[in-house]
Each structure stands twice: as C-alpha cells, then as structure tokens.
C-alpha cells in the first residue's frame, strides 16, 4: 500500500465533464483523469468501462490493467536483453534509453 500511496498525487479538478448521463457522478472520474493527464483509469464501474477510453486514458478493469502491466514488463525485459548484446561502441553512440532500461532491469532482478 505504501508504494501505491507514494505514486499518488492530489489533483485540483476544475474541468466539468458531462459525458455519462446514466450516472453523472462518474463524470468526476473523467474530469480527474483529464486534469491529471492519466494514461489509465482502473475501475469496476460499468458506465466507465463501457467507454473503453477517454482522451488518452484507457479504461480497464483491475485484472486487465495488471495484464497490461505484466506485458509491458516483459517487453522491457526483452529490450534490456537486446541492449546487453550491443557492443560498447554502439552504446556510446547509440540509443539514449539504454542506461534507463539497464537500470530498470537491475532494479527489478530477483535476488
């Protein structure tokens, strides 16, 4: 729980959204996502899930969100393995994200 709290921010919502008529209180979730620039809205609410996406935010159930994150981690692992195969001269001249991916890989390695 401490990890989740450390990743949270308080958002001052000024936007008024009137997209969901069946349950107007759901519009506050959309307004918050807009103000925060959210990439995901994780919910079990059927009205929000019916939208599928709002602006750039994908609206997913918790289980679908976890599947998405697991797939992203696997892609990062594969990218990190590819970077390990680069010659050191390629690393110096090459891709700027190599150090970040190696750092991520090293931080997430199992002991």
Image: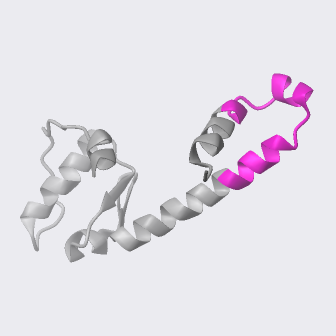
SS assignment for the magenta stretch, majority? helix
The percent coordinates of residue 39 (x first, y second) are: 39, 50
The magenta segment: 77-99
Camera-nearest residue between 64 and 21: 64
Camera-nearest residue between 34 and 10: 10
Dividing the picture into quadrants, the one containing residue 58 is bottom left
Q: Residue at x 15, y 42 (%)?
A: 15
In the image: residue 11, left or right of residue 64: left
Q: Residue at x 37, y 55 (%)?
A: 40
Image position of 102 with respect to 64: above or below = above
Q: Is residue 18 visible?
A: no
The percent coordinates of residue 73 (x first, y second) are: 58, 56
Q: Is residue 71 visible?
A: yes
- Of all residues, the one furthest to the front in this rendering is 111
The percent coordinates of residue 9 (x first, y second) are: 24, 38
Image position of 50 with respect to 109: above or below = below
Image position of 88 with respect to 78: above or below = above
**Residue 102 lies in the magenta stretch:** no
In the image: residue 78, left or right of residue 92: left
Dividing the picture into quadrants, the one containing residue 103 is top right
In the image: residue 20, left or right of residue 80: left
Q: Residue at x 31, y 58 (%)?
A: 41
Camera-nearest residue between 75 and 24: 75
Q: Residue at x 42, y 71 (%)?
A: 64
């Amino acid at each position: 729980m401490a990890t989740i709290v450390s990743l949270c921010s308080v958002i001052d919502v000024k936007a008024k959204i009137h997209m969901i008529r069946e349950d107007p209180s759901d519009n506050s979730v959309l307004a918050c996502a807009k103000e925060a620039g959210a990439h995901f809205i994780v919910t079990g609410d059927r009205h929000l899930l019916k939208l599928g996406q709002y602006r750039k935010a994908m609206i997913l159930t918790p289980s679908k969100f976890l599947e998405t994150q697991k797939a992203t981690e696997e892609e990062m692992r594969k990218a990190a393995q590819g970077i390990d195969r680069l010659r050191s001269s390629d690393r110096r001249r090459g891709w700027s994200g190599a150090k970040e991916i190696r750092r991520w890989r090293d931080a997430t390695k199992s002991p």
